[in-house]
Amino acid sequence: MNAGIDLHIHSNASDGSLSPSDILHRAQALNLKAISITDHDTVEGSKAAVSASLDPPIKLLSGVEISAS
């Protein structure tokens, strides 16, 4: 079975409900091969995910949604 990717995930560093570690574990359980934590106006969720270690590792891209007005 081919694993998927999700490139738009919000963590609790912005308006998501899961911690970056919980997101990684959920992605692993769903057999995703890559994710991007894409929080609003912060990369703190991505930084926390990089610090977390999973075996096997999941490819992680850092994203951010920037507010503009």
Image (cartoon, rainbow, N blue to C red):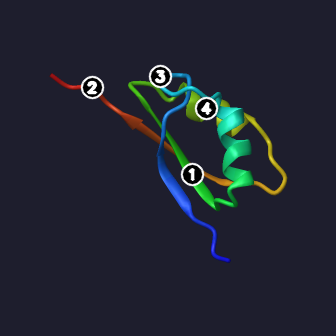
Instruction: State the mark number for residue 14.
Output: 3
Mark 3 secondary-structure assignment: loop
Residue situated in front as seen by the camera: 34 or 1: 1
The numbered mark, 2 or 1, whose residue comes first in the sequence reads 1
Q: Which residue is mark 2?
A: 67
Q: State how far apart marks 3 and 4 are (Cα).
A: 13 Å
In the rendered view, does 25 fall on the left or right side of 62?
Answer: right
Instruction: State the mark number for residue 23.
Output: none
Instruction: State the mark number for residue 47.
Output: 4
Residue 41 x/y as whole percent: 38, 25
The amino acid type of the residue labelled 2 equals Ser
Q: Which mark's residue is nearer the viewer, 1 or 4?
A: 1
Q: Which residue is mark 1?
A: 35
Q: Residue at x 70, y 61 (%)?
A: 31
Q: Quadrant of the C terminus?
A: top left
Disc 2 crowd rating (10 Å Cα; few below 14, some 14-19, many 20+) is: few
Q: State how far apart marks 2 and 3 are (Cα).
A: 12 Å
Residue 61 x/y as whole percent: 54, 49
The amino acid type of the residue labelled 1 equals Ile
Q: Residue at x 73, y 52 (%)?
A: 28
Residue 33, compared with residue 24, is above or below; it is below
